[in-house]
Image (cartoon, grey):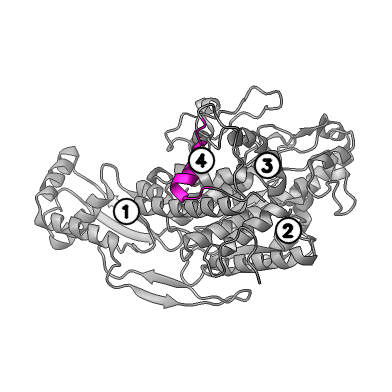
Amino acid sequence: MAAARGCPPAGSGDRALAELLLEFSRAQYRAKDGGGAAAKVERIERRCLELFGRDYRYSVIPNAHGEVCAHYPRHIVLLEREAGRDPFESTVQVGKLQDLINRSKMARCRGRFVCPVILYKGKHICRSATLAGWGELYGRTGYNYIFSGGSDDAWADAEDISEEDSALRNADSQLFDKVRGHDIKLLRYLSVRYICDLMVENKKVKFGLNVTSSEKVDKAQRYADFTLLSIPYPGCEFFKEYKDRDYTAEGLIFNWKQDYVDAPLSIPVSLTQSLNIDWSEYQSWDLVQQTQNYLKLLISIINSDDDSGLLVHCISGWDRTPLFISLLRLSLWADGLIHTSLEPSEILYLTVAYDWFLFGHMLVDRLSKGEEIFFFCFNFLKHITSEEFSAVKSQRRKSLPPGFTLEEICMLKQRDRGSTTSLSSDFSLGMESSPGAAGSFTYEAVELMPAGAQAQAAWRKSCASSPQAVLWSRAQQSEDRLPSAGMVEVKSSSSSSSTHSDNFLRIGSSPLEVPRSRLVSSSDRESRLEEVRSAFLACYSRTIGLKAVPPSPSGAIGGLLEQFVRGVGLRGSSTL
């Protein structure tokens, strides 16, 4: 069979991604679609299930004809635990979850219910649309929505009655109690505590009607028991400006003074104290800084010590929502904390296919309007390569006793094992290794009582001149590059819903039993994310291509197009 136009040669590792991007850019995905499109979608979904199965046991919620949601995957994946070794296991049962979904889906815009998509430390990271308003709820007959295939024009079908008007009637209030009550039960079943709302408005208004609502303005305060975060982020329309600025996000600032923008940033102080970010300045941030700071916030939330999950949503849940879900998935993967067996090309395929394509991102429509939020997501990876975005760093920072670095604690542990008297007058030390993120370990200081700053300084001075300390330091450097002794390769698999194998490493005998093969350094994180970004840019340029802005008077190639020419080595691209 001849290769599709724009695809790499048969056998290339990039071929599957190229075929996916071509399909994504040609047709809008709908679960109920049949014909040739269904066969292509089936191949994509099989590949996603295979990639999930590399590292996780999972169950599947069937959605073959869109009966659950017309623009969710036909096989909705419920991740249960990491295969073979994960001490964190989801308590969610697929049968109970499916029942709650069927009862609650009318509560959210377009029926896009709360759906778990990432499993991290036993916590479900979920996505959805915002809450449905009166017009949508009453505009349905059974499960036939007022929306016609996702077109924004379908909002015109809503009746000219606002939620405020309907709330005056007792029967309408009871309907909201019932529908949103089921939504709340679903959230609680998934152990979701944190709800991050990316909308820049309190309620979406179309043609003068309040067609959607949100948890933060629910009049009956049904969502008061949840931790609500209003983190307004520009919608897909804003990304036309990104494209028109030659795909340059630096210096691009959203206009917060527009009439429809009425949702201020609101974050509980308890969630911001450790981030060292001046949130009062959010309206002056450019697109890069705003996206970076929001991602830091989300990583901080999922790294908290509680067992609570997270929900991220915008309005329809298919533009801004996949942006942050995809960035979260890639960031945690780059840290070696999730999808640990996947190569860069594989995690890229998974997040493009599952987080964007199969959850209904309207790429065809967005490309026609120049609203290139999809491209922005993957090009943005260059801005989150540093350790400040690492969940591993966050775990270590929280677990270290004040005044000491991880390296110093390692040396202290080593010296303490070799002497029963040298440190006993200054320190009482107890260390324990405890399961952290899936497949990794964090280290909690149970007790560390230094005699004071002078004792700490004296200890550091003695360590600096200690041959044992120097030897340990050198050993650490070599272990960062080479597999540790005592590793055992294990293969195991079993699941009622999937069959797969899993390779992982266990560490035997280092002072803190660090599974170095599962944790990555900051330089590894950078290289992994850069590899994903480079693969995306190269494949995107060969398949979809970028639309160049009008040339400047100097005739210079635009910023990102210049990156293609110099970095990727491609002089042209085929725009399909």
Name the amino acid type tagged 4. Answer: Leu
Disc 3 and disc 1 in contact, CB within 8 angstroms: no
The residue under label 1 is 446
Tell me the quarter of the picture where residue 490 sits: bottom left
Name the amino acid type tagged 3. Answer: Tyr
The residue under label 2 is 100
Q: Position of residue 386 (x, y in %)?
A: 39, 44
Q: Kindly state the secondary structure of the residue where label 1 is placed.
A: strand
Q: Kindly state the secondary structure of the residue where label 4 is placed.
A: helix
Q: Earlier in the sequence, mark 4 or mark 3?
A: 3
Q: How many marks?
A: 4
Nearest-to-viewer mark from 4 and 3? 4
Which residue is at 72% across, 52% downward? 113
In reply to whether residue 496 is colored magenta, the answer given is no
Q: Kindly state the secondary structure of the residue where label 2 is placed.
A: helix
Q: Earlier in the sequence, mark 2 or mark 3?
A: 2
Q: Position of residue 542 (x, y in %)?
A: 57, 53
Name the amino acid type tagged 1. Answer: Val
Q: Residues within 10 Å of mark 3 (few under 14, many from 20)?
A: many
What residue range appears in magenta?
555-571
The residue under label 3 is 223
Name the amino acid type tagged 2. Answer: Leu
On screen, residue 125 above or below 45:
above
Q: Residues within 10 Å of mark 4 (few under 14, many from 20)?
A: some
Res 30 visible: yes
Which residue is at 46% across, 50% downward? 569
Tell me the quarter of the picture where residue 69 sits: bottom right
The residue under label 4 is 560
